[in-house]
Amino acid sequence: MVGLTMLRELVRSPQTAPSARRLSLSGIRPKFQEFPIAGTIEPVAGCFPIGRRRPFLAVERGTSCNGIAKREVLMRTRIIHLINPKTDSLTTRPIYFNRALYSPLAGLLAVAACIPKDQYQVILTDENIEAIDFDLKADLVGISAMTSYVNRGYEIADQFRAKGVPVVMGGVHPSFMPQEALQHSDAVVIGEVELVVDKLLDDLKQGSMRGTYKSDKLHPMLGMPMPRYDLLKKHRYVNKTFVQTSRGCHQGCTFCAEPLMNGLKFRYRPVDEVIHEMENCGARTISINDADFFGTPERPKEVMRALRGRGIQWQAGVTSKLAQDDRMLELAAESGCTMLSIGFESISRETLKSVHKYVNRPENFMALVEKVHSHGIMVFGLFMFGFDGDNTSVFDETIKFNIAAKYDACAYSVLTPYPGTLTWYEMKKVGRIVSFDWTMYDQGHVVYRPAGMSADELRIGQASAYEGFYARSSIAGRFPLHGKRHRAQWLIYNLFMRRASQTENIDSIAAPTAEPNVAPMPPILPVKRDWRAAVLEAGGAGPHLM
């Protein structure tokens, strides 16, 4: 969560997506655009002071009315400029009608909602659709970034700081690599933002905003403010409204950052607050921005019962187990669900077990797709190549299966060892990671040495998967002539994905680079003892939530 870089991070549903740090033509995983919660401030030696910026000053002017002198205190409007750096991915590129399919803005909209309107004007810039105004007289710049576009975020931060504007960074990558991010910013928010934003803004007013801001607890998800949907340029996106009903995921997949960012336990927003946001967000087509909306048996049913009869169409990212529950699917259809994005990952049971995706049963995949279709709901399948059990036969076998099962859409990722995930620590320990150029961490470039094929074979195989699945003959054969699936939405996704796969143009593997000079520090330590030991052994001891 690019090629399909952003789709995986957003279809699922980070800010934040899906799980969480995957996306690209290589993938489509959702979410992680959050900053932190309230808590402690940890100054970091060597970070740039922000004393270059003058504090907010009141200006007094004398006036006179009927001979009586009056004083009027005027204060310049304080501006916070929130920026989403350019990703140049399939989903964020304006491909048709000058619109992008998605953009990872959910986190920044949530951040904006935490900023007092009576004290600050918030300006939102999505570099995927518009240029950044570096001459804007902002009092603070906030940048949220995932790994594949954090380098662009650093460039933006450096330019504003050169002008004397203080910069705070947040999002998935800065949360896992705060010491690296502090080389380019005055402050870093680790994890969620809601509980630390007041302290950060107070420090900004005092000229003392610096170091890391991280809460000592996770947000209870109660009373969350309405995201600032008014800041969106809605005419520039196909999918523009992402509503979060929960945070966390209990799957614990080795390649995913979600449990280390938001925890293994689900935290739920009150159903009435979720419905209030959906009814007042200004859209009737909504993406539910959870890592796994069907994560537990009863909670999603509560939300869907409350959604019935409201005329809202929605889609969500889920895992395969509860997507086979007939009552769950009946409620989904009755409440307006048009598509479920499911992380199938692989058609090999042994591969799935090796990455702790125990919930998936490949022998049931075809029947699952058919069952979801029977309720008039589309299936967006998320698959990944490059696992240690994969060889060059995996590409044709997967595509033939996807076409035969009539998946409505698919995204294919190259396995990517995002810093701070267990996959990262496993590969790093044995020297398999070749490139540490974060721009290449887009789930399309190969940044490690695969076990069962060459890096070039993996790159070419992933590209061929898109070519095969989105060939004209495949699209024609899979088109839903019968049943209640949403045909217009089906065509939009297939046309976007076909066009994107033709414009990705990844023609080489990532070049070797030097290692970073700092280690990842997951915001939350793993629960499993051996996983926790791997983090601490690699030097990832930091301000963790235990």
Image (tube, rainbow, N blue to C red):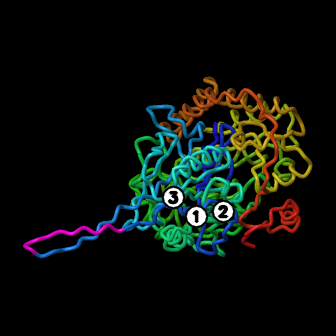
Amino acid identity at mark 2 = Gly
Marks 1, 3: nearer the viewer: 3
| 205 sits left or right of 408 in the view | left
| 436 sits left or right of 76 in the view | right
Amino acid identity at mark 1 = Pro
Q: Is residue 1 visible?
A: no
**Mark 1 / mark 3, whichever is N-terminal:** 3
Q: Nearer the viewer, residue 4 or 34?
A: 34
Q: Residue furthest top?
A: 473
| Numbered range of the magenta stretch | 58-67
Where does label 1 land, which residue? 300
Structural distance between the alpha carbons of marks 2 and 3? 16 Å
Asked if disc 2 and disc 1 are in contact, CB closer than 8 Å, the reply is yes
Residue 356 x/y as whole percent? 81, 56
Where does label 2 land, which residue? 295
Asked if disc 1 and disc 3 are in contact, CB closer than 8 Å, the reply is no
Amino acid identity at mark 3 = Val
Q: Residue 103 lies in magenta, yes or no? A: no
Residue at horizontal 73 percent and vertical 54 percent from the top: 256
Residue at horizontal 7 percent and vertical 73 percent from the top: 66
Residue 518 x/y as whole percent? 78, 55
Q: Residue furthest left?
A: 66
Where does label 3 land, which residue? 243
Residue 87 x/y as whole percent? 59, 41
Q: Name the dominant secondary structure of the magenta segment.
A: strand
Q: Is the residue marked by circle 3 packed among few (<14), some (14-19), or many (20+) residues within 10 Å?
A: many
Q: Nearer the viewer, residue 209 or 464?
A: 209
**Mark 2 / mark 1, whichever is N-terminal:** 2
Q: Nearer the viewer, residue 171 or 343?
A: 171
Residue at horizontal 59 percent and vertical 57 percent from the top: 169
Label 1: element kind: helix
Rendered position, 508 above or below 159: above
